[in-house]
Image (cartoon, rainbow, N blue to C red):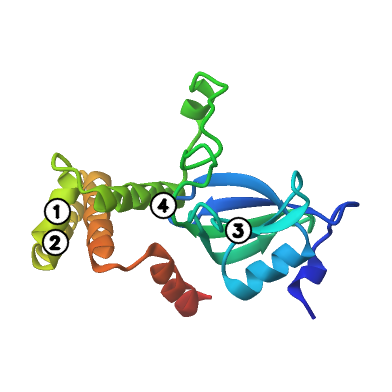
Amino acid sequence: MSAANSIKFDEKGLVPVIAQDATTGDVLTLAYANREAVEETLSSGEAHYYSRSRNELWRKGATSGNTQKVIGVRLDCDGDALLYRVEPQGPACHTGEKTCFFTTLSDGAIEDREEIGFGDMVERLAGTITERHREMPEESYTAGLIRSGTNRLAQKVGEEAVEVVISALRDERLAEETADLLYHLLVLLEERGVGLDEVAKVLRERHG
């Protein structure tokens, strides 16, 4: 039985699809898919949508090259919306912006009041580290760490781990030292090409 059978398509045979960057957690775009688009996405591992303006199936990046590798498809609780977790190869928006949601309507006051969870913060930090690795700006501390190589990075993680142990024994600055350790560990993972999804997979296999 096709997985698409679980989806509640609307009267036009479409379902809204949110594309989310699997690394950073950023929402990239809102599009639509019909049954064929969903099935093509599931079988190919590349994001497919349905263009309501052109009335045709389309593969993201077919002409621009800005493809989206799909690493997971999720159905919402009502069965009438999909989430594509993707690894984007280039901007998601036709304007050249990374995400279609680049227009700010509020002055930031709402966002400032939001409490960002630990998992979201780790994903944001990992995404920033990935960007620094891609761009390698001269003034970036993260880029400098990556340039220093695996041996130095591994040593740095060891040093930060010792700082965490000392802080725990002294009962002071444990949160700050843990944040330092986590940051350097994420840089090491990025330098070695190990994604957060790989770590999450190991955790799921161990703990269910």
Element carrying mark 2: helix
Q: Are marks 2 and 1 in contact (CB under 8 Å)?
A: yes
Disc 1 to disc 4, how far (Cα)? 19 Å
Upstream in sequence: badge 3 or badge 1: 3
In this view, the residue in front, 60 or 103, is 60
Farthest residue, direction front: 63
Q: Position of residue 205 (x, y in %)?
A: 48, 79
Q: Image point 65% across, 45% down: which residue?
A: 30
Instruction: Answer few, some or many: residues within 10 Å of disc 1's Cα (few below 14, many 20 plus, some between 14 and 19).
Output: some
Q: Are marks 3 and 4 in contact (CB under 8 Å)?
A: no
Q: Image point 68% across, 56% down: which residue?
A: 49
Disc 4 to disc 2, how far (Cα)? 20 Å
Relative to 20, is 58 on the left or the right?
right
Instruction: Residue under label 4, please give it.
Output: 123
Instruction: Residue under label 1, please give it.
Output: 145
Q: Amino acid at mark 1?
A: Leu
Relative to 13, is 143 on the left or the right?
left
Disc 2 to disc 1, how far (Cα)? 7 Å
Element carrying mark 4: helix
Q: Image point 19% across, 43% down: which residue?
A: 137
Q: Position of residue 184 (x, y in %)?
A: 21, 55
Upstream in sequence: badge 4 or badge 2: 4
Q: Locate the N terminus by quadrant.
A: bottom right
Instruction: Residue under label 3, please give it.
Output: 84
Instruction: Residue under label 2, please give it.
Output: 153
Element carrying mark 1: helix
Disc 3 to disc 1, how far (Cα)? 32 Å
